[in-house]
Image: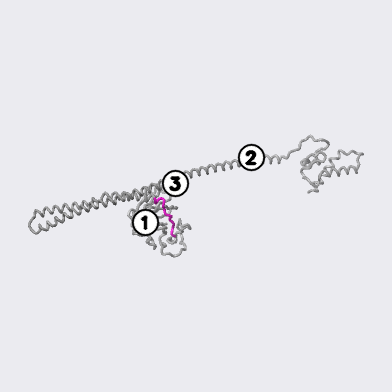
């Protein structure tokens, strides 16, 4: 405490000045007054204990000497030639501070470089997106021009087909009308011939009738045959355009919870489902599957071409495809077209289409996603396991019976 330091300091000063006091010349009062003045200069009530300045020469107090048996400050008999002893701990602390400062500066430079790199990368992305934006605008401008031209071309071809068909029909009507007139004459002649003998004439008329029958049948098959081929070409071109547009008009398929089996847990966003060991408490619904672990998607389709992709996780059995809206909801559902289900999936370790019997499907290139393509008017359901590859299976003659069909899922 302060009393101890002060006591130790006083004792040290008394011992230090003992060498300067000669016997016979000691004057108590003057010496005490002189000592009091010196004590005031020491400022014992303030300052730090470890470093006090000698009032005579302002020399740093040597704490180590005091602690090691030397009871006073360094000799104050005259000017000191020794340099102050530096604190080793302070020197080490300054060196560590310099190292830390250098580390911080290096880190700051790295952050500046990272910031500059991020800005350059952002500018690069912005430049690339701008180029892509311009490319998209240009391509869609070309696409609009192409579609407009194709529309005009197809409509013009259809108009030409109409004109050609009507012209041919008029020509055929003219020919037929002439033949009808000829037949009228021939009929009258035959009726008169029947009234009297004339087997030779009858034989000639028989040959004429045979020629007319052959000519009529040939005319029926050839009159519009080439026009039918031209119409089929236009129809195929229209199907190509429809498929192209379908790639930009993929439906937003979600799951319908009102149809989900109690053992299927449908996610909140209705974009996924998983199988549960225990039945979930669900409200009753006549649309709900209560036997098979199935769920239907939404919306349903009653026309057009549509496609959607489904991601499948896990190693269990599953099936997906389309089903008629009237598919049975009670008990076990056979996955067959005659039951209103057109689907494919995994059975054990292999892929198959659920026909009767099942058809194995190669699974090479499968990456966990299946794309389903529905052509309602064409009566086709196709399945793709990889983008850009041909379909792995197609139901060619799907009969939907005019009903709406829905995306179908079984787990």
Q: Are marks 1 and 3 in contact (CB under 8 Å)?
A: no
Q: Nearer the viewer, residue 246 or 10?
A: 246
Marks 2 and 3 sit apart, C-alpha to C-alpha, by 52 Å
Rendering coords of residue 177 (x, y %): 20, 54
Whether residue 119 is situated above or below residue 341 in the rendered picture: above
* Label 3 crowd (10 A; few <14 / some 14-19 / many >=20): few
Q: Identify the disc placed on residue 107.
A: none
Q: Identify the disc placed on residue 303.
A: 1
Secondary element type, mark 1? loop
User: What residue is disc 2 on?
Assistant: 102
Q: Nearer the viewer, residue 335 or 103?
A: 103
Magenta includes 255? yes
Camera-side mark, 2 or 3: 3
Camera-side mark, 2 or 1: 1
Marks 1 and 3 sit apart, C-alpha to C-alpha, by 31 Å
Residue placed at 87% from the left, 38% from the top? 20
Tell whether 138 sits left or right of 189.
right
User: What residue is disc 3 on?
Assistant: 137
Q: Which residues are magenta?
A: 245-256
> Which quadrant does the C terminus fall into?
bottom left
Tell whether 277 sits left or right of 7.
left
Q: How is the image coloured?
A: one colour
Work out which residue is located at the far top of the displayed protein and give it: 81
């Amino acid at each position: 405490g302060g009393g101890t330091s002060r006591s130790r300091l006083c004792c040290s000063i008394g011992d230090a000045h003992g060498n300067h006091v000669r016997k016979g010349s000691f004057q108590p009062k003057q010496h005490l007054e002189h000592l009091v003045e010196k004590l005031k200069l020491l400022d014992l009530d303030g300052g730090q204990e470890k470093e006090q300045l000698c009032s005579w020469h302002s020399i740093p107090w040597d704490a180590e000497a005091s602690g090691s048996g030397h009871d006073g400050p360094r000799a104050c008999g005259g000017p000191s030639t020794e340099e102050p002893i530096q604190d080793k701990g302070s020197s080490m602390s300054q060196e560590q501070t310099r190292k830390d400062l250098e580390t911080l500066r290096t880190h700051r430079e790295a952050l500046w470089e990272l910031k500059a790199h991020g800005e350059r990368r952002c500018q690069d992305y912005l430049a690339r997106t701008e180029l892509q934006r311009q490319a998209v605008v240009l391509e869609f401008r070309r696409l609009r021009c192409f579609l407009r031209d194709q529309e005009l071309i197809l409509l013009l071809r259809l108009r030409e087909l109409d004109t050609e068909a009507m012209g041919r029909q008029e020509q055929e009507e003219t020919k037929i009308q002439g033949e009808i007139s000829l037949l009228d004459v021939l009929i009258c002649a035959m009726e008169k011939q029947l009234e009297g003998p004339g087997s030779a004439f009858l034989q000639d008329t028989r040959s004429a009738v045979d020629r007319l029958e052959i000519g009529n049948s040939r005319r029926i098959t050839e009159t519009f045959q080439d026009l039918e081929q031209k119409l089929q070409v236009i129809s195929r071109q229209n199907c190509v355009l429809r498929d192209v547009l379908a790639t930009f008009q993929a439906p937003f398929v979600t799951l319908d919870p009102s149809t989900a089996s109690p053992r299927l847990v449908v996610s909140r966003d209705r974009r996924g489902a998983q199988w549960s060991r225990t039945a979930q408490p669900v409200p009753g619904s006549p649309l709900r599957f209560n036997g098979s672990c199935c769920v239907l998607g939404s919306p349903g389709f009653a026309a057009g071409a549509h496609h959607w992709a489904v991601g499948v996780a896990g190693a269990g059995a599953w099936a997906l495809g389309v089903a008629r809206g009237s598919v049975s909801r009670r008990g076990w559902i056979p996955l067959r077209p005659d039951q209103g289900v057109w689907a494919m999936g995994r059975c054990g370790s292999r892929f198959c289409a659920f026909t009767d019997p099942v058809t194995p499907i190669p699974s090479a290139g499968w990456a966990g996603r299946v794309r389903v393509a529905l052509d309602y008017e064409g009566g086709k359901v196709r399945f793709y396991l990889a983008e850009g590859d041909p379909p792995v299976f197609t139901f060619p003659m799907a009969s939907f019976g005019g009903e709406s069909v829905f995306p179908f899922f079984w787990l």
